[in-house]
Image (tube, coloured by chain):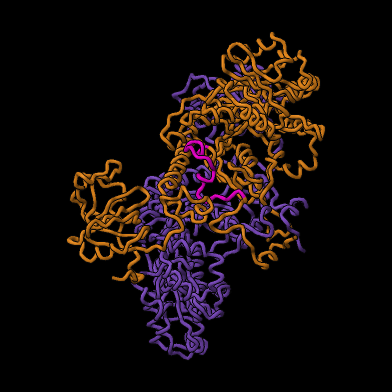
Chain colours: A orange, B purple
Amino acid sequence: MSMELSFKDFFVHSLRSHHCNQLTKADVGKRVTLMGWVHNRRDHGGVIFIDLRDREGLTQIVFNPEICGTSHTMAEHFRAEFVLHVEGEVSARPDYSINPNLPTGEIEVMVDTVKLLNNCNPLPFQLDEADSVSEELRLTYRYLDFRRPQMSSILQARHRVAFAVRQYLNSEGFLEVETPILTKSTPEGARDYLVPSRVNPGNFFALPQSPQIMKQLLMVGGIDKYFQICKCFRDEDLRADRQPEFTQIDMEMSYVTQEEVFRITEGVIRNAFKAGINHDLRLPFPRMTHKESMDLYGCDKPDLRFGLELFNATEILKDSNFKIFNTTLEQGGVIKGLMYPGGASFSRKDLDDLTSYVGNYGAKGLAWFKFVDGSVQSPIAKFFNEDSIAKLQSLSGAKNNDIVFMVCDTQNVVNQSLSALRNHLARIGKMIDDSVFSFLWIIDFPLFKYNDEEQRLESEHHPFTAPVVEDIDLLDSNPLAVRSSSYDLVLNGVEVGSGSIRIHNYALQKKIFELLSLDEYAINEQFGFFLDALKMGAPPHGGIAPGLDRILMLMLGLSSIRDVIAFPKTQKASCLLTKSPSAVSDRQLKELHLRITK
Amino acid sequence: MSMELSFKDFFVHSLRSHHCNQLTKADVGKRVTLMGWVHNRRDHGGVIFIDLRDREGLTQIVFNPEICGTSHTMAEHFRAEFVLHVEGEVSARPDYSINPNLPTGEIEVMVDTVKLLNNCNPLPFQLDEADSVSEELRLTYRYLDFRRPQMSSILQARHRVAFAVRQYLNSEGFLEVETPILTKSTPEGARDYLVPSRVNPGNFFALPQSPQIMKQLLMVGGIDKYFQICKCFRDEDLRADRQPEFTQIDMEMSYVTQEEVFRITEGVIRNAFKAGINHDLRLPFPRMTHKESMDLYGCDKPDLRFGLELFNATEILKDSNFKIFNTTLEQGGVIKGLMYPGGASFSRKDLDDLTSYVGNYGAKGLAWFKFVDGSVQSPIAKFFNEDSIAKLQSLSGAKNNDIVFMVCDTQNVVNQSLSALRNHLARIGKMIDDSVFSFLWIIDFPLFKYNDEEQRLESEHHPFTAPVVEDIDLLDSNPLAVRSSSYDLVLNGVEVGSGSIRIHNYALQKKIFELLSLDEYAINEQFGFFLDALKMGAPPHGGIAPGLDRILMLMLGLSSIRDVIAFPKTQKASCLLTKSPSAVSDRQLKELHLRITK
């Protein structure tokens, strides 16, 4: 029998009675209609067994020539991923063929009628071998990738999470408001994607890096509680957890304290984890000041699933004969370290590797002290007196067979290299429990940092961030000591959201711009419309924008943000499936008043 | 007392206990905290009354110097739109000041503590006078516009509608999947917005005109039921109901019949109307074939809130002495007409105006016959015999004092001009009941139309639309007779959604491309990746995409699509609030390898 069917046969005229993960023993005897893909086919002495697959799961369908007649001949031609419409009766499987791993494992459908809804060319990769093919191939044929239960379940989880977030925020009185995609440059400071205007030649829209200003204007407009699950765009060089377009759970609320923003955010995250993976997070999340985080972990997004806290050994070790330390300390440097339990077993090679590892973060060396059977082993032990070493052991908490690492350098280099070393050691020491979701609020960031090059203050967050109220009096006298009402949400060492209480008063905003020595003309050009709004009865407000992609990636235990995005871009910012970006016609360029330069 | 407060005072340290539409007589005696805007202020012999406003409504707050002490002095300085934090006790209003029109009209709050959270400059327009200021001014200060209850309630309705649509589709097993904004040109055929790629110089992304291809790929990928409330982009010249970016309720489903798409769509619309305006729509919506709609209404989106059906008078009037008719009919023209009850009272001037009105649609003239007291009045009556006129009166249903209009021209011109005339007459005759929502499915569109200029078939919808199964055999013999499985949803004469069952088989798709005489190379360049997908076991599928903005506009009885969009563009495709599009720096253009031409 030929597989050349009339086009007419490919279309459906009736609906499925069940999906492929639905039938159980309770349905035995029912007449059913199923549609789906041939997942696999087995010919057992003339009786053909096919696992029929759809989004929900698998059902075994049986072509017995005594029951299905000519359909059996058709079934002999079915190959993987052919699309079938079958009708038949649900039958209990014989005991020996029951599959306890499938919800439908106790039944099979005895087909009496079959229609081929579509055929299928040989596939570029087998679905069950996708793990072993290149990501490039999977992205080029993303639609085949979706048919794998792993990918399908990711998209299903993403849907459930987004829906649960909307349900929760709706129940809290938030309104979802759509802000424009064709808009104006925003103050995030990354590079904008631009869209040339045909109607206004020489002018451009920018795709939003975030709806920051728009959501603040909604607050000025009395919308009170806003959210949007929205696309944001940054034309940056990509890393594993970055995409040109990404999705934010963008929120802003009026008349609120930082405490209230935390309550709402924690509710969002808790509902997301419940809906996504049925995991109950404990609230509230712990908090840590920015200072404490920098002191103990050397960074503002510590992974708290393991210890390895840093300690400051400057005081203990400042009086030594070790010239390298002394010179660095004289130039304002610090000594910080961390103790790694059992690390006395590291070989010379291991230690060289770790030294070169911290070198990537600017550290010119990695000092170490092994404590073994009451004695200390270190190439630089001789430069320190016994008392110093005893104090170091005590401060670090090192016991027998432990090792203490230290870096002496500028505060920045010390923190960056030891923070990286800490994460690295936890990974190689398998100290990380992957089943733990460790959330943490980092609070009390500094409002400003000093830009040495330009000799002026810069915003640590963005210039619309409010100072902590208690510190407002320090704005003039000691601006670098002013804390900001901003906060980051950290999950397992990854920043997954950032927000702040905003400045809502024009006079204060103007003062901040003055402190930042910003060019008034440029400000008015870019943000004049926003400053005007602050003069028109803007209410106190604040917000946050957790990143949906990153949260999903971590929630689902995936290593790439591309795995949680239906149609992601590669790290070269292109789409392998559609081959975009691509060339456009001369007519299109002419209409946009543009010419491509070399 | 000065209004110059310390910046510290502007921030909040506690939350509201209630919103401004919440307190009733049951709350009398409670101590409450409210925050909001000064809606208005009245000084009654030393006691100051303020209506405090937030998103939810108004509450009267009272500054009695005997209770609030120095706060009273502050209150004397409060102007419209100042932002207040007040605390006080809920008190029953005296009988004479009860306002039955306000939910909070039976109470007032006796303020004992007040904090000014922000002041406010004089406004560019008063909120209660917004209806009389230009739309330009409202769009420039859109955030003030939002504070008006009318605008706020639109955004609230939009939120409720989108949320209800998501709830319904979730309950029907649909997954919301985000498709890319940075993507490739799609086949809708309008002009794309382009985004230059910095990383791939000379190449461009296109903003999606719709996620058409992506959602079909999701079906090929087994996602089964997809939806997305998503932005679409078309760089077209704008009309009142068009915006450069607009929002679609995009849906696609596998293994379904047209009937099932209708059921789901009707569920979406019904839930939207219930959530938006608490209106119960009756299902199912009526249906009409494209042919019937063209015959009876001259268009494919008839407004059925009134009658005025067209009739075809070609047969009746073809034998006359009227040369203009005869010549037109010889060239293949037709005569159609409509009867307007009571229209015999139209003056010569009225009739000249109507003639010039249909002239806008290409009609070279508008014939009319008034039937008055048993006689006919018409400048062209003399060309027709009595029998023809009697038949015309009978066919048109004209009674005493009615008028019959007729246009004789090509079918297109006749239909377009009479369809426009029909709507125009209904408006001027006040025949339209604004409280009615008249939904209608138009089905059985032709699959092709003939492009006389290029002498080839063109798709009526888009080239991925499936033919009606019964007509597939006509593809070769009589392609123009083939109906398509496409459908439009019409509301009150406006197309609010369009969809189809798609072609899911490669061989059939290839045949359609051949019939369209499309350039194979160009097709492969643009859609090759999609055609590949059709070879890989694509399931039968179909969908639709109702336009959220238009539906909201009609649901809420508004006349401009801009009223239902938070931050719309003007008809010149610019944003008055942010002043975008705007110039960009030379550095930005250089990074994108672009130069602006004159």
| Circle count | 0
Vertical relation: A174 (above or below) A308: below
Residue at image position (56%, 66%) is B525
Q: Position of residue B357 (x, y in %)?
A: 56, 72
In terms of depth relative to the viewer, which is nearer, A135 or A194?
A135
Of the 4 image quadrants, the one containing the C terminus of chain A is bottom right
Q: In this rendering, does residue A442 appear at all?
A: yes
Q: Position of residue A121 (x, y in %)?
A: 41, 63
In terms of depth relative to the viewer, which is nearer, B376 or A590?
A590
Residue at image position (65%, 34%) is A538
Q: In this rendering, does residue B556 appear at all?
A: no
Q: Which residues are magenta?
A: A551-571
Q: Position of residue B195 (x, y in %)?
A: 64, 56
Residue sitting farthest toward the top: A387
Q: Is residue B290 left or right of residue A327?
A: left
Q: Which image quadrant is residue A308 in?
A: top right
In terms of depth relative to the viewer, which is nearer, A269 or B97?
A269
Indicate whether residue B306 is drawn in magenta.
Answer: no
In terms of depth relative to the viewer, which is nearer, B131 or A461?
A461
Indicate whether residue A560 is drawn in magenta.
Answer: yes
Vertical relation: A173 (above or below) B350: above
Of the 4 image quadrants, the one containing the N terminus of chain A is bottom left
